[in-house]
Image (spheres, rainbow, N blue to C red):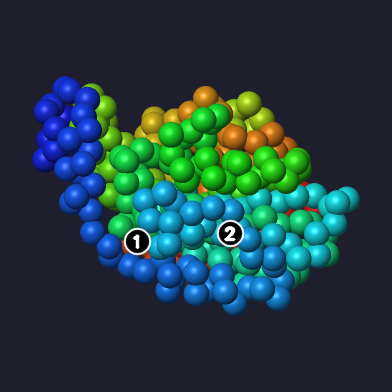
Amino acid sequence: MMQQSYPIGVPGQIWNSQHKKQWFEQQTIKRSYKQEVLGKIAGLHSLFEVIQYGALPYDTDKYPVFILKSSNWQLDRPVILITGGVHGYETSGVQGALRFAETVASKYVQQVNFLIAPCLSPWGYETINRWNPDAIDPNRSFYANSPAAEPRLLMEYLQSLNIELTAHFDLHETTDTDNSEFGPALAARDGVENEEWEIPDGFYTVGNNQNPQPEFQQAVIAAVEKVTHIAPADKWGKIIGTPQEQKGVINYDMAKLGLCGGFSNATYVTTTEVYPDSPSANDEICIQAQVAAITGGLDYILA
């Protein structure tokens, strides 16, 4: 645990609206949602119905949000939700969801119904940010009357379908910037002391401690291990400060924390975490690991 200064705000004091405005004005566009995400979604019409379920209020023309819905939807099939880009800076979550839709989903479309929302936070994707423009973390905001448009739009759309989810794969990354930028920013925003955790070198999953499904998590880990290495626990037997339940698996109370993985009553839920900054990984390996996580979990469910 350590105190780290941050250039915005007063240490020990919660940010006011002026501090949040100052933070927002420092953000810049670094990549294109239109080219890197929407361009790929446009090529998936043969397998999926491409549905715009809303648009982010910061710029409704620039930031429409889409979900891919199985075009051969059958009411008697399990419904599988895949979400990426809840944290926009976590690139392989977005690109992993798209890669799965492009290359592997066709193997399963006769057995399950898919709902794939590849990029919930397009502004965050473009600015490489954890937060939205209001300095709110979308992945702590999955609850009723959410102040964040990113989770609210998705939850409203899914509620309108009146369906039950069998499984939810929420694709994330843990990066070195969690300690260098996003952790210090969070501590400054909330007026608390910054805590740093040892960033795990490798892939791990987060299950829901209200419904952990350890065998399902194990199947995900086993599939990913064929692609990349699994994160070891630290010397205290923890991963990011949380006790390891089994190899590469920790559990959170997802609903209590407002996490994306906790908003539904899906039977099988996992949040994937890859480490793109590892010397043993690269962007392509991280994308492949996300795809492997989905396929490993699906094969377990269907078996």
Q: Position of residue 143 (x, y in %)?
A: 53, 31
Q: Answer with left or right where residue 275 lies relative to residue 254.
A: left
Q: Answer with left or right where residue 6 lies relative to residue 123.
A: left
- Disc 2 to disc 1: CB gap under 8 Å: no
Please tell me which of labels 2 and 1 falls first in the chain: 2
* Quarter assignment of residue 189: top left
Residue 59 vertical position relative to residue 179 in the rendered view, above or below: below
Q: Position of residue 288 (x, y in %)?
A: 53, 66
Image quarter of the N terminus: top left
Q: Position of residue 179 (x, y in %)?
A: 27, 43
Could you tell me which residue is drawn at 17 percent across and 23 percent down? 13
**Labelled disc at residue 52:** 2
* Quarter assignment of residue 22: top left
Residue 163 seen from this side: yes
Could you tell me which residue is drawn at 53 percent across and 73 percent down? 40
User: Which amino acid lies under the numbered mark 1 shown in the image of this protein?
Assistant: Glu
Q: Secondary structure at mark 1?
A: helix
Residue 290 seen from this side: no
- Front residue of 296/171: it is 171
- Front residue of 167/43: it is 43
Q: Secondary structure at mark 2?
A: strand
**Which residue, given by chain and number where applicable, does mark 1 sit on?**
126
Could you tell me which residue is drawn at 43 percent across and 39 percent down? 148
Could you tell me which residue is drawn at 59 percent across and 28 percent down? 209
Residue 276 vertical position relative to residue 142 in the rendered view, above or below: below
Estimate the spatial distance between the alpha carbons at disc 2 and disc 1, rounded to whole Å: 19 Å
Label 1 neighbour load within 10 Å: few <14, some 14-19, many 20+: some
User: Which amino acid lies under the numbered mark 2 shown in the image of this protein?
Assistant: Gln
